[in-house]
Amino acid sequence: MGCTSGLAGVLLKSIVHKIHYWIVTKVHFEDQIFFYVVFPFLGIVLTTIIVITLFKGNDRKGLGEVLNEIAQKSSIISSVKMYSQIIQSAVTVGLGGSAGLESPIAVTGAAIGSNFAQTYRLGYKERTLLLAAGASAGIASAFNAPIAGIMFAFEILLTGVVFSDFIPLVVAAVCGSLLSRILLQEDVLFRFYTRQSFDYHNIPYYLILGVVSGFYARYFVLIYHKTEHVINSFKLSRLRKAMIGGAALSLLCVLLPPLFGEGYDTLKTLTNGDTSGIIEHSFFGYLDLGSWTVIIFLALVCILKAFATSITIFSGGNGGNFAPSLFAGGTFGFLFAMVCKQFGLIDVPISNLVLAGMAAVMSGVLYAPLTAIFLIAESSQGYDLFIPLMIVSVISYLMAKWFSAVNPDYKPMIDQGKIFSNEYDNNLIYTLQLRDYIDRKSQTIEADAPISDFFELIKNGKKNIFAVIDKEKFLQGVLTMDDIRPYLFNKDQELPANIHQIMQAAPAVVHFTDNAVAILKTFDDTGAWHLPVIDENDKFIGFISKSKILTGYRQLLKDYS
């Protein structure tokens, strides 16, 4: 798994790097404008055409879908995703889409692991383990950071999964990382060699950077989802959305070339303190405002990066916000350092602030502080920077949690019970398929039926609760043995004319689409042990039993423990 997923990551990174190298370094700026206009537009449009023609319009992408398949489909992922994400993201990001390759690499690795397990008919635990191992190896190969790959699996993919067997993840991540180190050229690797030693006198810089990065991460998330909402509100065909999004992205890349592609080369330039190499390839190269030129330029890059990423992904491209959060954080860290210097502060650790900014914003955007800490520490070989990386990552993460308790990317799916959260009991309950617990052989009687019919029903049946319906099978009420007992043992009690006179209103009604957590809450609120279930047309289906649900939950607990 480690070797296969690692090779997939190496292949994707190599293709994209070759395209970027040719466009950015082999062509002068005047000619680059043509590429910035044409290529991002083509990338999104071509990806959309590929999805429509080759993959029948199925463009479900992102880690949210993998989390859904872990929670709802027993970690079974379609074999198509073993190659679809590579093709789509290579076209999008290779031609300048402002997104990252890491999410597609992780999805590809997860799909390879899942299908490997399916081939050998392994169980849910082993299938989930191999899925996580594939994703871990993919991330490790993308960044040449095995520990970060393992942390990624635990913090994001295995959230809410009771898991202790992490040795296979270590093996897979090491294999993926080694392959990328052996096969990829040095300039392709996510490596930073310029940094300063940690000085505790600089802790105030990191404290302030952690706070402002937390606010910036929140801005990034809000713009990301607001843009998604706006694009999804367009009543246009996929191809037209792609053309509009491609045109908008091309315009942004012309104005601010660092928005083209992943942006890792820009980060390496910033850590080396070389701003001229970035400015000269844009229209800002013609301005002469001193240090303010760089500050204004980088501020615009930070502001518009969130727009560029969301436009790329939601207008029809394929990619993730893993790399964009790193790029935006590194740029924001350098901008913070430049502002500090502009105010006359001395001994500003510029390179360290770039690295810390990457960790801080990534932590706040992805809700993955451990992944961010180890990723930057491994990529910069800056293990002495653990303290500042921890400071900025934890501050940014806590601020993100204060704004939203769960990652906004996954909140709608968590609320619907489609993916796991940190509430382990609810995770198991959500996996229950309620259709399996509905008694479709429940006994029914019409409301206008005589009491004698009900006595006959009791005589020939084995149920203790009955549904009262009309001729159209709409639920009218319920009857229990307690309701009829006075008439059975008291001969002086006058019998009612029909069922309608003795039936009771149901304590509550369960809809066929309700999830298990909501149903159990209804049971607790009403104190009932049986509730009627109705379909989308409000017609009676059967009764559902609280005891059966709890029995199924106990069995799941036994299987998953």
Image (cartoon, grey):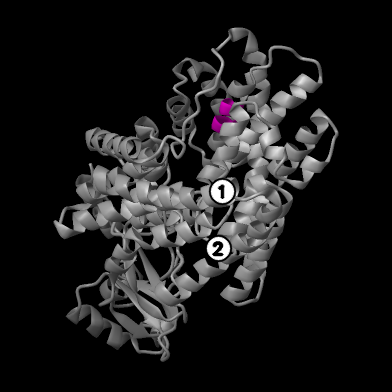
Establish if 8 lies above or below 143: below
User: What is the secondary structure assignment of the residue under circle 1?
Assistant: loop
Who is closer to the viewer here, 397 or 3? 3
Position of 198 with respect to 334 (left or right) is: left
- On the image, the x and y values in percent for residue 180 come to 34, 39
- Residue type at the position of mark 2: Gly
Q: Is residue 4 visible?
A: yes
- Magenta segment range? 354-360
Foreground residue among 422 and 390 = 390
Q: CA distance from mark 1 to mark 2?
A: 27 Å
Q: Which residue is mark 2?
A: 43
**In this rendering, would 92 be left or right of 539?**
right
Q: Quadrant of residue 402?
A: top right
Q: Residues within 10 Å of mark 1 (few under 14, many from 20)?
A: some
Categorize mark 2 by other alpha carbons within 10 Å: few (<14), some (14-19), many (20+).
many
What residue is rendered at 26% in x and 51% in y?
A: 113
SS state under label 2: helix
Which badge, 1 or 2, is on the more N-terminal residue?
Answer: 2
In the picture, measured across the screen, residue 52 lies left or right of residue 128, that is: right
Quarter containing the C terminus:
top left
Position of residue 234 measured from the top left corner of the image (x, y, whole percent)? 66, 71
Image quadrant where residue 349 sits: top right
On the picture, is 329 further left or further right than 92?
A: right
Residue 239, position in %: x, y?
58, 74
**Residue picked out by circle 1:** 408
* Amino acid residing under circle 1: Pro
Q: Secondary structure of the magenta portion, mostly?
A: helix
